[in-house]
Image: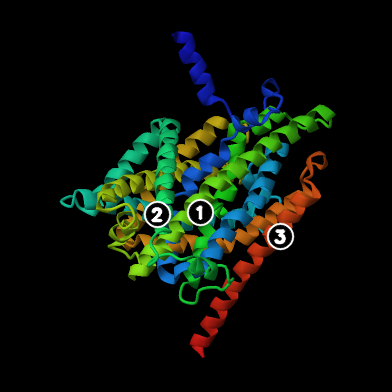
Amino acid sequence: MAKAVAVQAIQVTKDPYRPDPAEISAPPRTFGAILSRIGPGLVLCASIVGSGELIATTTLGAQVGYSALWVILLSCIIKPAVQAELGRYAIATAETGLAGVNRMPGPRWKVNWVVWGRAETAAMSLFQMGAMLGGLAQVMKQVLPAVPTAVWVLGFLALTLALLLGGGYERIEKLAMVKVALFTMLTFLCALLLMRMPHYFSWEQVADGFKFQLPGEGLITAVAVFGITGVGTTELFMYPYWCLEKGYARFTGPRDGTPEWRTRALGWIRVMHLDVFASMLVYTTATLAFYLLGAGILHGKGLVPAAGDMIPVLSNMYTDTLGPWALYLFYAGAIATLYGTIFASTAAHSRIYPDMLRLMGLFRAEDFATRQRYRRRFVWILTVIPAILFLVFQSPVKMVLAGGVAAAIMLPVVTTGALFLRYRHLPREVLPSAWITLGLWVAVIVIVCFTGYYLWTQLMALITARL
């Protein structure tokens, strides 16, 4: 018994960011074996399928109908190219995502401007976290109206702190991922049933969604959705951390210039590629289902989620397709989806911020105990501040969009950074093929052009208003 406790203590305190030659492992070769080693992308799904899909995506559909369908699909399929490149870099160098972009040229104080920009974007994402806490509180308010919304917010705050600080995060996260998967399956079923409702759905309307036109009044919402659906700015930064904690870089071992190292690196990169593809299938299916329900049911009924009625409005997606009995099913799924995202996002941010402090020189890279202390402090910060923000602003939809716009603006910087690392710092032994490189270039160009168009239109609107 004592030996088991000692082994568990060693595992808990082991630094997952420092490669250990004793952990070098040959990559799996068969499809089944490779599939059994995926995981980082599925962890991202726990945070991806959350406020962006349940709130922002359905709100966009409610505002503009099917016309922005192409924005949703593009957002999901274009960004994995950048995600995979950042994962490749992490496996080959054992560096975190923040350490990688800190190599980019430009102004710096302690760390470079990209890292500071990332910190600002993460701060804006606290609005999204507050929106999710508020959404949870609104769900519980529907179930037990006598309890004030503020009490539910504080209750979920206390529960999150207890679970994350108490060491139960990994177990709860796995449970949350299962619940999110079930909610996604139910939402996909609702989307299939929607196709049998001609007053809400037609293939002509779907075809209109691929005319590549930006919706006028829903432009800001569309850009916010582009920034946070699929693999957003936050998830792109998260992914290298989860690849490192999964062990892909440790299994590869330190780069020593040998053919054996190259074989291991390419093998674990192949595992990572399947991980990226599998997660893309999951969140693309979920995102499209949420959008179709918003565009069909909510837009068809003239309903747009707002501050106080977000959950009652969104519940129409279930009750109008499955029937009135599905209302509490929606409540349960919404709780699982939003709370699972709170867990995954808080866990990731509480790793990224201490890493920034490490890069600024506040502690040494090998000082894992100090890294852990900072992580626990940031759990407090990243849980308490979102609750305060919701209690102040009381509008989950606007809070999600505020964080989404900030993430969309930072997205071109992250994607350009992936391109920079690929050409300047990625070991030559693991350079991607020409086709993968072409896909990366296409992703970067599309993301830069899309965000640039948004900024240009906003600037012109501001100038026109002042004139």
Percent position of residue 396, x then y: 36, 59
Q: Is residue 42 above or below residue 403?
A: above
Q: Which residue extends farthest left?
A: 146
Secondary structure of residue under mark 1: helix
Gap between marks 3 and 1 measured at Cα: 26 Å
Q: Is residue 273 visible?
A: yes
Identity of the residue furthest to the bottom in this view: 467
The residue identified by callout 2 is 193
Residue 104 or 252: which is nearer the viewer? 252
Count of marks overlaid on the render: 3
Q: Which mark is residue 122?
A: 1
Could you give the CA–CA distance between mark 2 and mark 3, rounded to whole angstroms? 35 Å
- Contact, mark 2 vs mark 1 (Cβ under 8 Å): no
In the visual, does 369 lie left or right of 305?
A: right
Q: Tell me, for residue 442, which label it has, or none.
A: 3
Determine whether the residue tagged by mark 3 lies in a helix, strand or loop.
helix
Secondary structure type for disc 2: helix
| Residue 331 sits above or below residue 243 on the image | below
| Mark toward the start of the polypeptide (2 vs 3) | 2
